[in-house]
């Protein structure tokens, strides 16, 4: 199992990026969360089989059609999400 904290930068707010991330992560069977940040980026925690987490990170580089992703920064995370669902959290 693999857990990563990701930060997505670019035009990623106001383009349904969080909803797309929640939907995509759930379809892949990942646990975790996604939220907007006040600096205009989106951050997420992905937890699941390593190959599936890597697939999600690859998909994050494109995002939904209206998004313009400039960068995806991912690092290993110690935090493991509660439960096995994928949630959309409030902006921080």
Image (tube, helix red, strand yellow):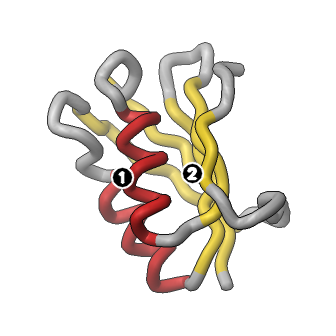
Q: Earlier in the sequence, mark 2 or mark 1?
A: 2
Marks 2/1: CA–CA distance? 9 Å
Give me the disc on residue 89: none
Of all residues, the one furthest to the left in this rendering is 65
From the top left corner, tell me how far across and down residue 74 is, in percent.
56, 57
In this rendering, the answer to whether 64 lies above or below 56 is above
In this rendering, the answer to whether 87 lies above or below 4 is above
From the top left corner, tell me how far across and down residue 91 is, in percent.
65, 20
Q: Could you tell whether 64 is left or right of 35 in the image?
A: left
On the image, which quarter does residue 11 sit in? top left
Pick the residue in front: 70 or 27: 27
Residue lying at 36% horizontally and 42% vertically, measured from the top left: 20
Q: Could you tell whether 22 is left or right of 20 in the image?
A: right
Q: Residues within 10 Å of mark 1 (few under 14, many from 20)?
A: many
Residue under circle 1?
60
From the top left corner, tell me how far across and down residue 51 is, in percent.
46, 85
In this rendering, the answer to whether 61 lies above or below 20 is below
| Circles 2 and 1 in contact, beta carbons < 8 Å | yes
Q: Could you tell whether 36 is left or right of 69 in the image?
A: right
Residue under circle 2?
6
Asked whether the viewer can see residue 45, the reply is yes
Numbered marks: total: 2
Image quarter where the C terminus lies is: top right
Residue lying at 56% horizontally and 67% vertically, measured from the top left: 30
On the image, which quarter does residue 34 sit in? top right
Q: Could you tell whether 10 is left or right of 8 in the image?
A: left
Asked whether the viewer can see residue 75, the reply is no
Residue lying at 57% horizontally and 84% vertically, measured from the top left: 49
Q: Residues within 10 Å of mark 2 (few under 14, many from 20)?
A: many
């Amino acid at each position: 199992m693999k857990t990563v904290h990701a930060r997505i930068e670019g035009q990623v707010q106001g383009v349904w990026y969080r909803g797309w991330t929640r939907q995509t992560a759930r379809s892949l069977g990942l646990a975790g969360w996604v939220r907007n940040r006040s600096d205009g980026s989106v951050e997420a925690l992905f937890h699941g089989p390593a190959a599936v987490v890597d697939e999600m990170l690859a998909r994050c580089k494109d995002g939904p059609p209206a998004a313009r992703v400039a960068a995806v920064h991912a690092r290993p995370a110690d935090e493991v999400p509660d439960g096995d669902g994928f949630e959309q959290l409030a902006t921080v």
